[in-house]
Image (tube, helix red, strand yellow):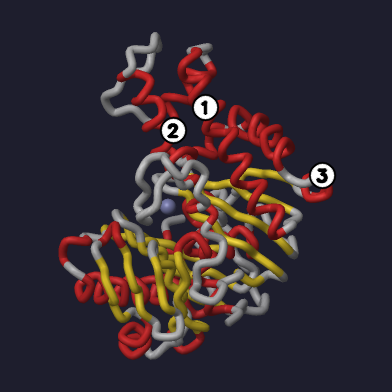
Amino acid sequence: MPVASLAQTCSSRGTIYDSDRQGRSIFPGIGGASLRTAVGIDLGGTFIKGAVVDEEGTIVVKEEIPTHAERGPDDILRRMEELVRSLIERTGIAPAACAGVGVGIPGFIDTDAGVAVEVVNIGWKNVRVRDPLAQALGLPVHMENDANAAALGEAFAGAAKGCESALCITLGTGIGGGVILDGQVLRGASHMAGEIGHIVMYPDGAACNCGHRGCLETVASATGVVRLATERIERGEKTELQKANLTAADVFAAASRGDSVAQAVVAKAVEDLGRGLAIGANIVNPVIIVVGGGMARAGEALFRPLREAFGRYALGRVADVVTIVPATLGNDAGVVGASKLALFP
Ligand SMILES: [Zn+2]
């Protein structure tokens, strides 16, 4: 049933569920107690994703709009506000019954001031986010960086649900990381805890966006895999890989078909990733390591060698208790985690 007709049929009943994560239509049941809800927002370079999420971590409704970074922060914040209003309206609940809004920001943030300090991929510097949104909406607004929000989402309703400690990473253009302890995200003194992507693996390596060289994300992110493969193509090594429009998925696919250059690239990236995760795990000693992002879709072609590499570097008693698994919330992790900030502040 389309969302609009559900809303028309059931708006008097309270919470409306248009689908669960598998896309099936579900209802909370007539007479069932309404669950508290909050809005989670995931600000990205291309899209702003939003969802109303209930206190069990189930997405009630979701929606996404283009970011249009070029229009500047005021325009983005205004449309973010409209997105929140639209989402709440679609659920049919009174805006005041919404616990608040959580916003995941893809950059460095200052949660005390409610400011996005630096967001490179949408060109923000020192943008006030929390107070303007809270004033416009009349709701509490909470902020988190996007990697921490994704980690919180996986701990709330995904692969790390019920785990008291978790190390979560997202393998995309960079490597985002978040540490969960006792169900809470670890923030640290300047909100930088969990930045595993910037462990310096090779001090003389490729330049990283953070200003250092040879960070883990320069060698083991999707971008890193493409860069390593491109270097080998340019050296004239014999491979089926083509330099134009090359993706990490292409490299994994070629490796699975037996392309030795692609296999060497994957092996190197996975070895470094295993070493980076072992460094993080020796500090955190988590019960689970959750790996998400586009590259995690490679499945066991990634996870089998990753577990082996991890085992070569982590302390035995650290490796003994940890499982390394794929994330389960996919692109929803950020909005689910952001909503948790408002549901359980
Ligand atoms: Zn770095």
In front: label 2 or label 3: 3
Please report whichever mark, 2 or 3, sits nearer to the chain's N-terminal start.
2
Mark 1 — residue? 266
Q: Residue at horizontal 53%, vertical 36%?
A: 297
Marks 2 and 3 sit apart, C-alpha to C-alpha, by 28 Å
Mark 3 — residue? 316
Q: Is residue 95 above or below residue 278?
A: below
Amino acid type, mark 3: Gly
Occupied quadrant, residue 242: top left
Residue nearer the viewer, 243 or 63: 243
In front: label 1 or label 3: 3
Mark 2 — residue? 225
Give the residue furthest to the top.
Answer: 238
Q: Residue at horizontal 42%, vertical 37%?
A: 224
Please report whichever mark, 1 or 2, sits nearer to the chain's N-terminal start.
2
Q: Position of residue 299 (x, y in %)?
A: 59, 33
Mark 1 neighbour density, 10 Å: few (under 14) some (14–19) many (20 or more): many
Q: Position of residue 55 (x, y in %)?
A: 62, 73
Q: Is residue 167 above or below residue 187?
A: above
Q: Secondary structure at mark 1?
A: helix
> Do tag 1 and tag 2 residues touch (Cβ < 8 Å)?
yes
Q: Residue at horizontal 61%, vertical 58%?
A: 154
